[in-house]
Amino acid sequence: MECRDVVEAVTAYIEGDMSPEDRARFDEHLAQCDGCTNYLTQIRETIRLTGTLDAESLPPEQRTALQAVFLVWAADR
Amino acid sequence: MVSPDDLDLIARLRARDEAAFMGLVERLQPALIRVARMYVQSQAVAEEVAQETWLGVLQGIDRFEGRSSLRTWIFRICANIAKTRGQREGRSVPFAALAGDDLDAPALPESFFQGSDGPHPNAWSSLPADWTTFPQDRLEGSELRRVIGSAIEVLPPMQAEVIRLRDVLGWTSEEVRNALELTETNQRVLLHRARAKVRRAVEAYMESG
């Protein structure tokens, strides 16, 4: 496995979507490559940072509209 | 599959619990509108589709059999309504338009690797930086969050939605596949592209400071 392959396989590696053989090759490459080790760390850090974004909040007029949908439905049974 | 939290939520919805419903609306509505927007022509129609989805959820909750997670089921309802609306509008959206035409492109430009004439073809031409040495205040600041948010916003819609659901909201790959009707491979490729582009945005920001 070469550095270029590691970059393209990094998501499969993190997701656990790899055959045991490919995983072993990936790990073997990492053990001797600082560049790829850094790249994997960068991707993990990217995932962590993305996870710190706030979920979007709901505009109040939509909340009111959907509350009305609920109340009509709940009253109807 | 249906989690204990889902079972509780389903029971509360069936019992006409307004707070339970509004909590769910709060969490899912923005994503539902975005998913609907992939198939219909305007934001206004997408909002109508999302509203229709919630009505469908309420009307269907007594019959919901729990063969998928609750939120997956809700997304499927939304996608179905949106696709029907889109077809009625005479709009057909090819998968490539949603997924982006760069799915086969490499995650990094050629120049990051040594060519066949280098001492180590396909190895790094210069090593990726060690991000653990970046200044913490810059890494944890709100400006970087805005940079990441903007990087996600400009992704093709399906790439943006996959990374939002997976990495912002923490859904499992199975849920995302089911909600967005993606194959295992497509889900992973979309996520791969999206993360690679967000990584580059983070790198550019950190190196500019």
Image (cartoon, rainbow, N blue to C red):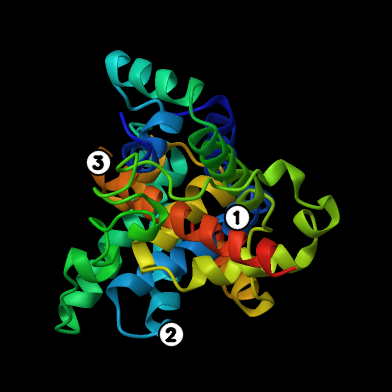
**Residue matched to label 2:** B44
Q: Which numbered disc, 3 or 2, marks the residue that appears first in the sequence?
A: 2
**Residue matched to label 1:** B27
Whether labels 1 and 3 share one chain: yes
Whether labels 2 and 1 share one chain: yes
Q: Nearer the viewer, residue B106 or B20?
A: B106
Image location of residue B26, percent across then percent down: 63, 59
Image location of residue B4, percent across then percent down: 56, 25
How many numbered dots are placed on residues in this image?
A: 3
In this view of the protein, can residue B59 be seen by the observer?
Answer: no
Left of B172 or right of it: where is A48? Answer: right
Q: Nearer the viewer, residue B129 or A42?
A: B129
Chain of the residue under the numbered disc 1 shown in the image: B
Residue B46's disc is none
Image location of residue B146, percent across then percent down: 67, 69
Whether labels 3 and 2 share one chain: yes
**Residue matched to label 3:** B185
Q: Nearer the viewer, residue A52 or B147?
A: B147
Q: Is residue B134 above or below residue B2?
A: below
Helix, strand or loop at label 2? It is helix
